[in-house]
Amino acid sequence: MSLSVVIARGILSEVQRQGHDPYALLAQAQIERKRLLDFNETLSMAEFEPLLTGAIAVTEDLGLGLSVGVHAPITMWQIVGHAMLAQRTLRHAFKVLQRYSAL
């Protein structure tokens, strides 16, 4: 499984918004900055996990995913985000996420 760099960019944006250096976090996770420029690029779970773990550690925000979601534009979540927004309830939104997240 892999994740779009768009998700990583959202996490780094939140890290910066909370007053921390996102580039230090990238270096710690051993991810080259230039990879984040290509929206078609993906990160493996082995690459993404240290980034996320480091972001939670540096921000001390156990709800980092929620913080990212609150401050991120819906376009960060691409088409799946738009499909989730169209749902009547949070339960339906999660079903859509489960169904289409592999895209």
Image (cartoon, rainbow, N blue to C red):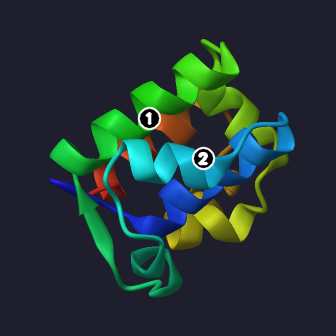
Left/right placement of residue 91 relative to residue 5 reads: right
Q: Are marks 2 and 1 in contact (CB under 8 Å)?
A: yes
Q: CA distance from mark 2 to mark 1?
A: 8 Å
Does residue 8 show up? yes
77 or 52: nearer the viewer: 52
* Rendered position, 40 above or below 48: below
Left/right placement of residue 85 relative to residue 39 reads: right
Rendered residue at 60%/31% (across/down): 65
Quarter of image, res 82 = bottom right
User: Residue 94, percent across and down?
Assistant: 48, 36
Left/right placement of residue 58 relative to residue 54 reads: right
User: Residue 47, percent across and down?
Assistant: 24, 49
Rendered residue at 67%/33% (across/down): 89
6 or 33: nearer the viewer: 33
Does residue 103 show up? no
What's the residue type where badge 1 is placed?
A: Leu
Rendered residue at 51%/57% (across/down): 7
Categorize mark 2 by other alpha carbons within 10 Å: few (<14), some (14-19), many (20+). Answer: many
> Reading the chain from its start, which is encountered first: label 2 or label 1?
2
69 or 92: nearer the viewer: 69
What's the residue type where badge 2 is placed?
A: Ile
Categorize mark 1 by other alpha carbons within 10 Å: few (<14), some (14-19), many (20+). Answer: some
Please give the residue where the numbered disc 2 appears in the rendered image: 11
41 or 16: nearer the viewer: 16
Left/right placement of residue 71 relative to residue 13 reads: right
Q: Split into 4 quadrants, where in the image is the C terminus?
A: bottom left
* Mark 1, secondary structure of its residue: helix
* Mark 2, secondary structure of its residue: helix
